Each structure stands twice: as C-alpha cells, then as structure tokens.
Amino acid sequence: MNLFETVTEMGHEQVLFCHGKDPDIKAIIAIHDTSLGPAMGATRLLPYANEEAALKDALRLSRGMTYKAACAGIPVGGGKAVIIANPENKNADLFRAYGRFIERLNGRFITGQDVNLTPDDVRTISQETRYVVGVEERSGGPAPVTAWGVFLGLKAAVEFRLQTSDLKGLKVAVQGLGNVGQNLCRHLHEHGAKLFVTDISKEKTEEVKRLFGATVVEPEEIYSQDVDVLSPCALGGILNSETIPHIKASVIAGAANNQLGVELLHGQMLTAKEILYAPDYVINGGGLINVYNEMIGYDEERAFQQVRNIYDTLLEIFDRAQKQDITTNDASKQLAEDRIRKARHLKTLAVV
C-alpha cells in the first residue's frame, strides 16, 4: 500500500504517526476534514496485525466521522485515533504519553473513549490534555442517547419503506445486546414491536427475553429471520455477500459501525433486493451528538433536539436515493459533502 496515495485518495488533511520510548507508544491520529470545525473522534486500542492494518482502520473510521458529524448537523469535523497495543499492557504512563501528543495539536483533534478504553483511561489522558471528552459522563454516557437516535431512525425507515408510523406488531431482529442494543429493545418493546434477539452472551439474551418477551435465536440465524427490520448493533462488516442473500427484512436500521462489508458492492446488493438501508453513521449519530454537547456544556433539551433531527435527515436521504436511483449510502455522502462544501464556501467569504 502506498501510504501517501491512500491518504490523498481518501481526502485526509493530516495523518500523524506518534512514537515514543519510555513508555513505548505507537499511535496514529487521522484528521480527515475540519471544514465544519475541529476534528472529533474517539481513540481505540487494539493489537493490530501490523501498522498497515492500524492505518487503514484510522483512515476509514476518521472519514466516517466526517460524514457522521456533517449529517448530524453539529460543527465538528472528522478524526480518529488508534493505539497499537495489547489491552493487557495498557497503563497510565501509556495514556499520559498519548495525552501529550493530543495536547500538541492544540485543539485540532478532540478525542474520547472507544474500543478497549474505559472512562478511567480517558480521565488519565485528560491529565495531559484539555482536548478530550467523556471525562465526567455528565449526561450518563452515550449509549442511551445513541439508542434513542437509532430508534428514531428505525421509525423513519419503517415509515418510508413500509408506509406506517405504527410499530405495534412490527417484527424486529436485533443483533447484539450491549448497552445500545438493550436500550433500543426497550424503546421497541414500549411501542409494541415483537423482538427477535441474539448475542454471544446467554446472560444478555435471557435478560432481554425476561424484560421484553423477546424470542432468542442463534447468532447465525439472525439474518434469515422472517422479520420487517434487521437491526445490527454489534460488529461491523456484517452486511456482505454471504449474509445479504439470507436477509428477509425490508429495512436494515441498527447501531453498529461500518455495517457494509464493501460499501459500493454491498450497498448495491441491498438496493437490488429492495432492502432499505439506514446508513450507520447517520442513524448512530446520537453518541457523537452526546459527547459534542458534553464538550460545549451539556444541555439535555438541545442534545435531544439534535438527536431528533436524525429522523428528518434519514427521510431526506431516503427520498434523495429514490429520486436519483442511487444507494442510500451514496445519498448520505452527498448530503454530508453538500454541507461541507457550504461550510467551506462560508469560510472563504469570511476571509474575503
């Protein structure tokens, strides 16, 4: 892989390779676009197979954050950071060293908690930098807000595809019962939906079965359920050439990141099957909206109003995709890029 060509092709403004000794740290900070504001994106820590895999992850996720922020209508850009390490070896010295790298960017990149980072880890990072969110969790964390946004997005997709705003009796298959998945199940149950759920944790499936009367199915059976909606809330890349032929749902609307295995190919496969896909970075934007509001001073009414906009944004995306005969993923990118171009134009006018 030619690193410079890859970065240029994906449109990144800046990619930083952070390396240090005592402690030994290897991290990559990818800043995709700051047209709307400073780049915001969480940090994940993983024992990547190699540095190329880590770079690909950072580039792909940071670009997704740009689109997510633009579609969410909040004034931040897209970024992402990865720390190459085994979770068993993480320690306070590592996170403090990482915090010093963040601080040197002077607010160009703002980060928070992702895979293998805890709130305590974020607080350690904050000892060295001001540019970190999720330190105090004043709003109760992002999961309930993310789930509320996914629920609203699911309602928008059902209204557009199935021509109904009533969820009573709607059959929904939920894959993954973490904090977001369980909160989503609660909202769906309260509105009369019939739930089919799966998770690798038997404890979680039994809990959701007890609380919401859900039908538990095996993980490999979730795609072929005879349901109206499939809601992926676990791993990415699950909409692919192996799973799509088995899907019977008319709508896919879930919280998982990067659900399409190959964006173009598998987006087109869903369209060919007349399955309406709610782009993941739009429907799961509640988490980003939540941490943005924590950063500027949390106002619950303002935050939830911004989350409610997910409903209207998705209806606009679905309508655009239908009128132009393109995938919903392409339509969401168009919408995001329109908003970014407008921001750049306004900045140019301000300079002149």
Image (cartoon, helix red, strand yellow):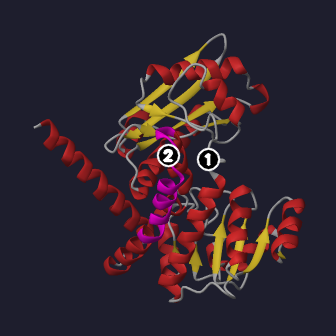
User: In what element is the residue under mark 1?
Assistant: loop
Residue 285 image offset from top left, x and y in percent: 52, 56
User: In what element is the residue under mark 2?
Assistant: helix
Pointer 1: residues within 10 angstroms few (<14), some, or many (20+)?
some
Residue 96 image offset from top left, x and y in percent: 63, 19
Residue 47 image offset from top left, x and y in percent: 70, 34
Q: Residue at x 74, y 31 (%)?
A: 86
Residue 338 forms part of the magenta stretch = no
Q: Residue at x 15, y 36 (%)?
A: 351
Give the residues drawn in magenta, as a range: 295-312
Would residue 201 appear left or right of 171 to someone viewing this image? right
Q: Are marks 1 and 2 in contact (CB under 8 Å)?
A: yes
Q: Which residue is mark 1?
A: 139
- Whether residue 242 can be seen here: no
Q: Which residue is mark 2?
A: 293
- Whether residue 346 can be seen here: yes
Pointer 2: residues within 10 angstroms few (<14), some, or many (20+)?
some
Would residue 253 appear left or right of 74 to someone viewing this image? right
102 in relation to 324, above or below? above
Q: Residue at x 25, y 52 (%)?
A: 341
229 in relation to 84, above or below? below
61 in relation to 321, above or below? above
Would residue 343 appear left or right of 122 to someone viewing this image? left
Residue at the left extreme, as displayed: 352
Residue at the top extreme, as displayed: 22
User: Of the numbered discs in the image, which one, if any, rests on residue 263?
Assistant: none
Amino acid type, callout 1: Ser
